[in-house]
Image: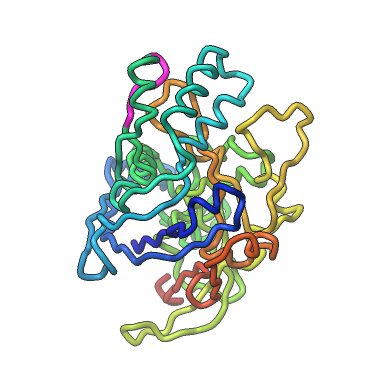
């Protein structure tokens, strides 16, 4: 896993309303080890498993040590700003958190890459842990590590691709397809049934005899949604094997009717229940990511995009200096050996 961060170069000017100037730092490379555990097989030719992940820093492949520091948005600050605006937040919590935000926390923070990913002690959460132990149970923040720890308990149920279905059709084309995620056939966090669909595999395998005219569907747990890739070209990979190169369509995160179900904003009260859609190229992660360590279910005010705002509306890319979208380097893809999958 290669991690790149954006280092804010004009923090004072930015807080005074100037356009942020960013420099990309990286890569900081981690070896990702996924292990499927608690495997169970069932009579209906399905397999269930959990998949904890481990990450090991690889200095030889990285541009610097992961102790390299950078300046960015303070996620805890922004999250707690959202929390005190939520109608369900008790007034006493709103008052105390508001006072602490004014005295302790700042909108920006400077941390090392290691701290940002794997954990640091947040001063405001530390005070909340003392003053409101019933609300704040932990003062450690690990923006990527929290998600990794949480996902270790997810349960996948997939088709094993063996035999034939009730109609006598070979099930090999269904191999790896997720039939249930955490015991459910769909999600329940988005605004409509289309957005909540769980389509495809977990992205680690595909059926044999892949075709150029098919979409490659995958459920990406990290962003709580399904995506698909489309055939782009045939390539020869680094070991000399011809593979089908599938890429993420430029419209995947567009502001469109198809994506309307991802427009829900659950951070504040929405009395009108209107669609609150982001510009093309951006998609909310608020229903998907939550701040661990608080007794209340507090969503993180995250917005995601392709790297460097690739495929984003021009108003988005023009709002920041330092983004340089490049289709070859920044578009998600998958290479499949067509015969074996």
Q: What are the residue bounds of the magenta stretch?
A: 134-139
Q: Where does the image place residue 181, in percent across and percent down from the top left?
A: 47, 41
Q: Where does the image place residue 191, in percent across and percent down from the top left?
A: 67, 38
- Determine if residue 123 is in view: yes
Q: Residue at x 46, y 69 (%)?
A: 334
Quick check: 71 above or below 274?
below
For the N terminus, the quadrant is: bottom left
Residue sitting nearer the eye, 130 or 227: 130
Rendering quarter of residue 239:
bottom left
Quick check: 95 above or below 143?
above
Q: Residue at x 41, y 25 (%)?
A: 294
Q: Where does the image place residue 306, in percent across and percent down from the top left?
A: 54, 62
Q: Main secondary structure of the magenta part?
A: loop
- Determine if residue 185 is in view: no
Residue sitting nearer the eye, 205 or 302: 302
Rendering quarter of residue 37:
top left
For the C terminus, the quadrant is: bottom left
In the displayed structure image, the side of residue 250 where residue 74 appears, left or right:
left
In the displayed structure image, the side of residue 255 where residue 123 appears, left or right:
left
Rendering quarter of residue 130:
top left
Quick check: 218 above or below 295?
below
Q: Residue at x 60, y 55 (%)?
A: 18
In the displayed structure image, the side of residue 216 where residue 206 appears, left or right:
left
12 in the magenta segment = no
Quick check: 306 above or below 140?
below
The chosen color scheme is rainbow
Q: Residue at x 54, y 40 (%)?
A: 301
Q: Where does the image place residue 110, in percent across and percent down from the top left?
A: 37, 48
Marker count (numbered): 0
């Amino acid at each position: 896993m290669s991690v790149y961060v954006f280092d804010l170069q004009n923090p004072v000017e930015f807080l005074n309303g100037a356009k942020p100037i960013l420099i990309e730092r990286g890569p900081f490379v981690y070896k990702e080890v996924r292990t499927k555990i608690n495997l169970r097989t069932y009579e209906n030719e399905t397999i269930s498993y959990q998949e904890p992940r481990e990450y090991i820093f690889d200095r030889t492949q990285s541009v610097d040590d992961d102790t390299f520091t950078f300046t960015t948005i303070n996620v805890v600050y922004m999250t707690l700003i959202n929390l005190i605006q939520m109608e369900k937040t008790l007034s006493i919590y709103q008052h105390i958190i508001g006072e602490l935000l004014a005295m302790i926390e700042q909108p920006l923070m400077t941390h090392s890459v290691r701290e940002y990913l794997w954990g640091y002690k947040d001063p405001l959460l530390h005070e909340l842990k003392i003053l409101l132990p019933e609300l704040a149970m932990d003062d450690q923040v690990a923006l990527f590590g929290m998600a990794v720890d949480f996902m270790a308990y997810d349960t996948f149920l997939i088709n094993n691709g063996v035999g034939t279905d009730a109609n006598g059709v070979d099930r090999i084309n269904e191999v790896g397809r997720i039939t249930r995620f955490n015991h459910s056939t769909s999600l329940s966090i988005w605004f409509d049934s289309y957005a909540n669909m769980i389509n495809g595999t977990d992205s680690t395998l595909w059926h044999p005899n892949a075709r150029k005219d098919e979409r490659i569907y995958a459920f990406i747990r990290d962003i709580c949604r399904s995506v698909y890739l489309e055939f782009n070209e045939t390539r020869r990979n680094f070991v000399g094997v011809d593979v089908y190169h599938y890429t993420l369509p430029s419209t995947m995160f567009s502001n469109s009717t198809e994506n309307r179900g991802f427009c829900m904003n659950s951070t504040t009260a929405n009395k009108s229940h209107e669609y609150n859609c982001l510009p093309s190229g951006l998609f909310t992660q608020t229903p998907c990511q939550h701040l661990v360590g608080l007794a209340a279910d507090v969503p993180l005010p995250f917005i995601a995009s392709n790297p460097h705002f690739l495929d984003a509306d021009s108003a988005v890319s023009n709002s920041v200096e330092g983004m340089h979208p490049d289709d070859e380097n920044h578009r998600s893809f998958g290479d499949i050996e067509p015969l074996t999958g």
